Amino acid sequence: MSSADRLLKAAAEPATAQDAYLSVRDLRIHFDTDDGIVKSVDGLSFDLERGRTLGIVGESGSGKSVTSLGIMGLHRTARAKISGEVWLDGEELIGAAPDTVRRLRGRKMAMIFQDPLSAMHPYYSIGSQIVEAYRVHHPVTKRVAAERAMEMLDRVGIPEPRKRFRDYPHQFSGGMRQRAMIAMALVNNPELLIADEPTTALDVTVQAQILDLIRDLQQEFGSAVIMITHDLGVVAEVADDLLVMYAGRVIERGTAEKLFDEPQHPYTWGLLGSMPRLDRERTDRLNPVKGSPPSLINVPTGCAFHPRCPYAELTGGSSETVVPELREVAEGHLAACHLADEDRARIWTEEIEPKL
Ligand SMILES: Nc1ncnc2c1ncn2[C@@H]1O[C@H](COP(=O)(O)OP(=O)(O)O)[C@@H](O)[C@H]1O
Ligand code: SF4
Ligand SMILES: [Mg+2]
């Protein structure tokens, strides 16, 4: 797109669209498979500023990981059909040359995964992998890079970093490996960090430590963070904004405060209902969402959530036939649901809130 086109487009869109550090516009990622087209991400838009954390929440299979890999430019295969725009610090990535995206990956944007072993090579020491990650983007000697790597290992709380530098991934515990992967992701001071279920495989204590660490590092480096999780409890502490995904789409978006205090979408009510209460046993679940997420090859008509929604019959048939648009239901708070405002308010105050 020429700069004149961009200016015109920017003028036609809300002022925030091109100003944000990361701006995702109508992102679609579909996979052509033997069973049919999988619509993993189907029209996703959001903005993220530096210094803020966006939580992306949804059940397994809702398109969270495909979204994050898409932003990182890691779905460039023949079977993936990608459209939309991803603007990172003023540069559009979906239409960019592979080299441009590769250059930005690692340096401006980095990712941490649930399973550090998938991101690390089993046959190279932790230290040498961080050294390489640094040297890809910085023309320095191995010795300088090693100093930097040890600094990072120390910074993420690995005891005796000089000694552990030579260890292989399998010699680290799960929590330490996760720290090492964070060190590797942050070694180039990326301005965008995407953490995809970074604590799912860890026990509760280590989970809390890793979340604290990500929060501290973000404050120190002022980066933008996307925290992806199926567990609302994980983002309750760390996210400024939340985006709830269902079947490849955004069904609710707003500040974390608003989403937790006054959630607007029946699916979010269900997710909150399945969140373990701090003062209760994990087994005591309230109003969890019933059933399982749909196949993304045969997405239900209308609102994709309608087969599982207890309130679908209140919308006079629209839930089954019309895809609900994401619309502003309160200031800065968007939801995609056909329920009338009065119905939503009544259900929330009479049925849901008293139980939570
Ligand atoms: N490379 C691929 N080819 C085909 N389908 C895929 C591919 N990657 C992911 N999917 C499908 O996309 C959907 C969303 O997956 P994913 O983003 O991993 O979900 P989540 O991270 O929310 O659990 C799933 O139905 C998954 O099977
Ligand atoms: S649009 Fe209908 S089915 Fe979808 S969440 Fe709202 S009430 Fe439920
Ligand atoms: Mg995932």
Image (spheres, grey):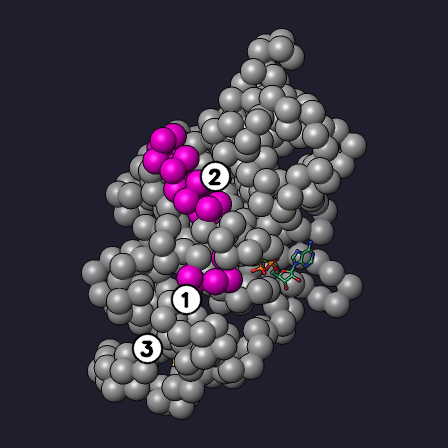
Spatial CA distance of label 1 from label 3 is 21 Å
Residue 251 in view: yes
Which residue position is annotated with label 3? 356
Query: What residue is drawn where x is 30% and y is 86%?
Result: 351
CB under 8 Å between callouts 3 and 2?
A: no
For the residues carrying marks 3 and 2, which lies nearer the camera in this image? 3
Q: Depth check: give the residue in front, 117 or 8.
A: 117
On screen, residue 341 above or below 226: below
Q: Which residue is drawn at 26% across and 69% down?
A: 262
Instruction: Check whether the beta carbons of the residues at disc 1 and disc 3 lie within 8 A of each other.
Output: no
**Amino acid type, label 1:** Ile
Reading the chain from its start, which is encountered first: label 1 or label 3? Answer: 1
- Asked if residue 315 lies in the magenta stretch, the reply is no
Q: Mark 1 points at which residue?
A: 251
The amino acid on which the numbered mark 3 sits, given as a three-letter code, is: Leu
Mark 2 vs ligand 3: CB below 8 Å: no
Q: In this view, does 224 lie above or below 129?
A: below
Q: From this view, report whether residue 339 is shown above or below residue 35.
A: below
Compare residues 155 and 218 and report the one nearer the observer: 155
Label 2, on which residue?
Answer: 193
Query: Disc 2 marks which amino acid?
Result: Leu
Label 2 neighbourhood size at 10 Å, few (<14), some (14-19), many (20+)?
Answer: many
Q: Tell me if 132 is positioned left or right of 192 in this view.
A: right
Write down which quadrant ligand 1 falls in.
bottom right
Q: Disc 2 on helix, strand or loop?
A: strand
At horizontal 65% and vertical 63% (from top left) the residue drawn is: 38
Q: Earlier in the sequence, mark 3 or mark 2?
A: 2
Measuring 71% from the left and 51% from the top, which residue is drawn there?
A: 79
Ligand 2 within 8 angstroms of badge 1 C-beta: yes
Q: Residue 276's x, y, as percent?
A: 43, 70
